[in-house]
Image (cartoon, rainbow, N blue to C red):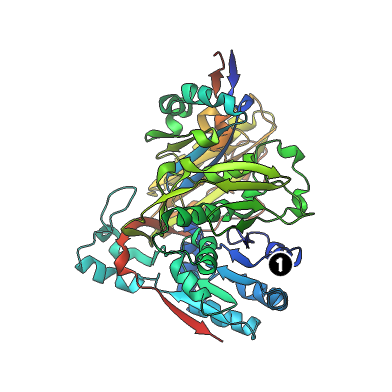
Amino acid sequence: MKVPLAKIAHTRSGDKGDTCNIGVIAHDARHYPVLVRELTADRVKAFFGDWVKGKVERFELPNLGALNFLLHEALGGGGTISLRIDAQGKTFGAALLGMEIDLTE
Amino acid sequence: MIRIANGQGFWGDWLEAPVRLVEQGPIDYLTLDYLAEVTMSILQKQRQADSSLGYARDFPPLIGRIAKIMLDRNVRVIANAGGVNPVACAEAVRKAAPGIKVAIVLGDDVFCRIDEFLAKGYQMANLDTGEPVTKIREKILSANAYSGAFPLAEALATGAHIVLAGRAADPALALAPMIHHFGWRETDWDKLAAGSVAGHIIECGTQTTGGNCQVDWQNIPDLANIGYPIVEAEPDGTFVVTKHPDTGGRVDSDVVKEQLLYELGDPQNFIAPDCIADFTTIHLEDIGPDRVRVSGVRGRERPANLKLSISYANGWKAIGTLIYSWPQALQKAQAADRIVRTRLGSLGLGFEEIYTEFLGSSACHGPVAHTSPDPPEVQVRIGVRGHDRKAVDRFTRELIPLVLSGPPGATGYGEGRPPVREIVAYWPTLIPREEIRSSVKVLG
């Protein structure tokens, strides 16, 4: 069964220069393995398309039922250089909530 | 147990927050984090314009407002409000509150030592791009090392009411009173990591008490009166995250998890000046209403280098906007963008970048935006940046003419021409720890 990520997780995003980080947290720890399986770095990179120019790295935090993503070269140069309205990537986490994932066990 | 609160998550945070924290319940230490990476650039520009500025100007009047209750309740303040001019900040504090003793932590400002570092062979390569700092040497405006908690703890030991730093690392503000109070040593890696995690949890203020929280956000109580975060720290490194009773917001493990992940890199290597913390060892437990207990934090030996934040002048930018309404709002906004770009091209103006986004359509989420086929209104937002200030200035005159000469119904031009802003950019790098010598100076 395909559902948007918002069904099982919440997110918070921020910046470090031109890199955007997105923390993805399972509402229920039971769904952490689904996050690990479905939200691969490659899929997150594909989801954002040309919005992310660099690589996507993924880190696991099983203790928090959470994943952390680093989206490199994603903020139009970042900091004061970026001309974007969301130069700090504050809304990237919300964007990821729309990604379709497969809940099937 | 000691109570450490944070009443300012960035410069520009709620002015009432620190006042409420000292008035509405018991705290021992009030930390105030004024500095983001971008903030150092802004402060640097202010010091350039006026050598008596370059610090968080909200801070001295705040201390004037809370000085009496600070003394009555024995609350001590630890703040990085000093920015790039902590001595001027301390003097302003002493004017606003003459009875207050201020200990200034100096040594983070290495602007005058860049050539000395280069002569010693330090490349100060950009952590993101790998380029050596010589590429921007002539354009450097400031250079500050992220100093740790031990100099702040030393300043607390002077008995000062306020410890004032420049570019102290954000989590160090909360770690310092733990070191001071519990006598933690420089090799107590697990405890220093726990204190740094506590600092990370509260450094963004209400982001850990229900602000900017996605979970059931409509039902987070009374955000208008949101309580700012408090850590109840124990000598063994465990702590409870909470807020004053009868304040708005919510503290639970969902909220704390969001903040733990905020601006996080590799979770097993959270690099602080005083240790490396492993976020995969953190154990959270909801132990009561608005109370989350944090335990289990493991740390490792501190890194050999300190982070060095260099700011440099990197050209000029300006961003202008116009609004178009239904019908075909997006198409009108796109047509306006094409006209502006054509005119900029005919004028022969050179920019490093011209960037257009369409607010109301795809500005925040780009290719994954949930766009509507015919939105009620769209704002076209065109930004340019480059090293030719005159070209950027000319750009600022190219939007408003479209009100009469472009697609129908342009509005939202009431602010007039957009300002031209200098870009003070940020160069993250490293410097060996032994090069940074902190000292403490006491006023009062």
Front residue of A86/B400: it is A86
**Residue drawn at point x = 53 percent, y = 65 percent:** B182
B194 relative position to B13: left or right: left
Which of the 4 image quadrants contains residue B12?
A: bottom right
- Is B149 positioned to the left or the right of B410 in the image? left
| Circle 1 chain | B
Where the C terminus of chain B falls, by quadrant? bottom right
- Does A37 sit above or below residue A82? above
- For the residue pair B390 and B53, the one nearer the viewer reads as B53
Q: Residue B349 location in percent, x, y?
A: 40, 49
**In this orientation, does residue A85 appear?**
no
Residue B294, image x, y percentages: 58, 47
Residue at (52% x, 80% y) in the render: B158
Tell me the residue that label 1 is attached to. Answer: B22
What residue appears at the point 59 percent right and 54 percent down from the top-left corner? B202
Q: Residue furthest front?
A: B236
Q: Residues within 10 Å of mark 1 (few under 14, many from 20)?
A: many
